[in-house]
Image: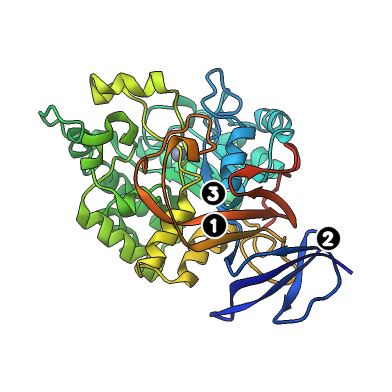
């Protein structure tokens, strides 16, 4: 007798979409059958939906702990389960920022009892905290992050000397360095009343920042990872340096693939994010990058803020904080691109699950439908279409940059280690079932 049989689903096996059953025992995938029913304690009828390995999102901000929680680990991981994401990695800009093993351990203790899905944590490094990288890596962070912007003083590395020190420290301990690569020295003030003028001001910040980081990565032979990459210029630079053998990886976000800066003139501060949305030519180039493999994976950069904070931006867009929730819409957005033939199902699985799992050092336990992998399985209805509305979301702030838009491929069920945690927007199981995962290699 096995524990669970997910029967009548479709999944990719050896690059072919086949119909069959997934056999699960002790939270792991045991194998696949094409027909017949092995004895199982529990049978789940997938009704011909597409089964994917659960998503791995290495870039979320669940605001926990924080004095102003627009989200917490409980609501954030519920939203993740709703979005088909079964492993998240939370960013270090919580309160206090995670820049030492001591704070890291406190954060683990604080959030562990609240998680519905498995989680990892990202450490933070900046000018004053370079010597703490080692202890954070030993405690099990998935990666280490620094910001080229000044917003988080303990986490920022802006000048070349600091960037070099940070890169050398991280290289020594064998984890990737995630970089928010926007160079604020490249902001070009533009006169304009429209919210989208914010995008125009920061049009080249990212590509200038990316160029600086890539050149240093080439010199220092350090693995850098460019987070939330938004522009054709940045991608062209990254692909050039990859071609020279520089160890660089890159992620983007669905809104950079599907939305342009004009969205800011409609949604105002609710479409404000750093780096800001760009142009149609950037959307097109980035979709090409995802589909051809130049972009390694796609994340949410889930970053909610309270409404009263966001709405300050209706008066002046500069006054609003940058960022918005997204962990629930990454997979439907990618699935929409797949159904509209911009992306193959094979690439979708790579960018949503396999590649981020490899990046965080947890593959093949996560990121694959393979015998022996954790039974993190997501069922998507390829025929469904839905409008993104406040009622539809589980994130505490109920905001989305896709608000009012139609997406395809609703996530109908999410299993984490063989346990059903979400079905039809309803959450099952209990908070605290999600486990803290360490980077293993
Ligand atoms: Zn972020």
Residue 26's tag is 2
Residue 60's tag is none
Proximity of marks 3 and 1: CB atoms separated by less than 8 Å: no
Nearer to us of marks 2 and 3 is 3
Percent of width and height locating residue 428: 71, 43
Q: Secondary structure at mark 3?
A: loop
In this rendering, position of residue 3 left or right of residue 365: right
Colouring: rainbow
Q: Which residue is mark 3?
A: 83
Q: Secondary structure at mark 2?
A: loop
Q: What residue sits 72% from the left and 60% below the top? A: 374
Note whether 151 is above or below 177 in the view shown: above
Disc 2/disc 1 C-alpha distance (Å): 24 Å
Which of pointers 2 and 1 lies earlier in the amino acid sequence? 2
Pick the quarter of the image with the N terminus: bottom right
Q: Where, by quadrant of the figure, is residue 379 drawn?
A: bottom right
Proximity of marks 2 and 1: CB atoms separated by less than 8 Å: no
Disc 2/disc 3 C-alpha distance (Å): 24 Å
Percent of width and height locating residue 438: 70, 48
Q: Which residue is mark 1?
A: 356
Q: What residue sits 59% from the left and 31% below the top? A: 98
Front position in the image: 12 or 128: 12
Question: Which residue ends up furthest to the right in the rendered image?
Answer: 1
Pick the quarter of the image with the C terminus: bottom right
Front position in the image: 314 or 156: 314
Percent of width and height locating residue 258: 31, 53
Is residue 404 at least partly visible in the picture? Answer: yes
In this rendering, position of residue 37 left or right of residue 177: right
Question: Which residue ends up furthest to the left in the rendered image?
Answer: 191
Q: Where, by quadrant of the figure, is residue 363 drawn?
A: bottom right
Callout 1 crowding tier (Cα within 10 Å): few <14, some 14–19, many ≥20: many
In this rendering, position of residue 71 left or right of residue 46: left
């Amino acid at each position: 007798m096995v524990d669970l049989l997910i029967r009548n689903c479709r999944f990719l096996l050896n690059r072919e979409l086949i119909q069959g059953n997934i056999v699960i025992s002790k939270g792991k995938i045991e194998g696949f059958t094409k027909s017949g029913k092995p004895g199982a304690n529990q049978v789940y009828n997938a009704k011909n939906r597409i089964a994917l390995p659960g998503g791995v999102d290495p870039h979320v901000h669940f605001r926990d702990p924080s004095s102003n929680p627009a989200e917490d680990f409980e609501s954030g991981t519920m939203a993740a389960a709703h979005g088909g994401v079964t492993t998240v990695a939370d960013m270090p800009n919580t309160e206090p920022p995670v820049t030492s093993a001591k704070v890291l351990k406190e954060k683990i203790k604080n959030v562990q009892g609240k998680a519905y899905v498995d989680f990892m944590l990202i450490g933070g490094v900046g000018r004053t905290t370079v010597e703490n990288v080692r202890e954070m890596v030993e405690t099990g962070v998935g990666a280490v992050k620094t910001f080229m912007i000044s917003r988080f003083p303990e986490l920022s590395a802006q000048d070349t000397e600091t960037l070099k020190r940070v890169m050398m420290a991280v290289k020594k301990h064998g984890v990737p360095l995630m970089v928010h690569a926007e160079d604020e020295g490249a902001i070009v003030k533009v006169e304009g009343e429209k919210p989208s003028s914010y995008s125009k001001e920061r049009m080249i910040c990212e590509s200038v920042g990316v160029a600086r980081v890539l050149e240093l990565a080439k010199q220092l032979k350090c693995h850098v990872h460019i987070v939330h990459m938004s522009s054709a210029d940045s991608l062209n630079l990254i692909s050039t340096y990859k071609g020279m053998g520089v160890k660089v990886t890159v992620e983007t976000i669905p809104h950079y693939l599907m939305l342009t800066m004009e969205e800011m003139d409609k949604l105002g501060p609710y479409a404000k994010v750093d780096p800001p949305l760009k142009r149609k030519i950037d959307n097109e180039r980035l979709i090409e990058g995802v589909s051809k493999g130049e972009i390694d994976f796609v994340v949410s950069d889930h970053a909610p803020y309270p409404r009263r904070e966001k709405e300050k931006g209706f008066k002046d867009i500069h006054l609003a904080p940058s960022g918005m929730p997204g962990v629930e819409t990454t997979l439907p957005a990618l699935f929409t691109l797949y159904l509209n033939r911009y992306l193959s199902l094979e690439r979708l699985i790579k960018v949503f699950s396999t590649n981020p799992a490899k990046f965080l050092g947890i593959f093949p336990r996560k990121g694959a439908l393979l015998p022996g992998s954790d039974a993190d399985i997501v069922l998507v209805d390829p025929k469904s279409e839905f409008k993104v509305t406040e009622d539809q979301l589980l994130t505490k702030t109920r905001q989305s940059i896709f608000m009012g838009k139609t997406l395809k491929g609703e996530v109908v069920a999410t299993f984490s280690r063989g346990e059903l945690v979400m079905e039809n927007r309803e959450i099952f199981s209990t908070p605290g079932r999600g486990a803290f995962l360490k980077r293993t290699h």
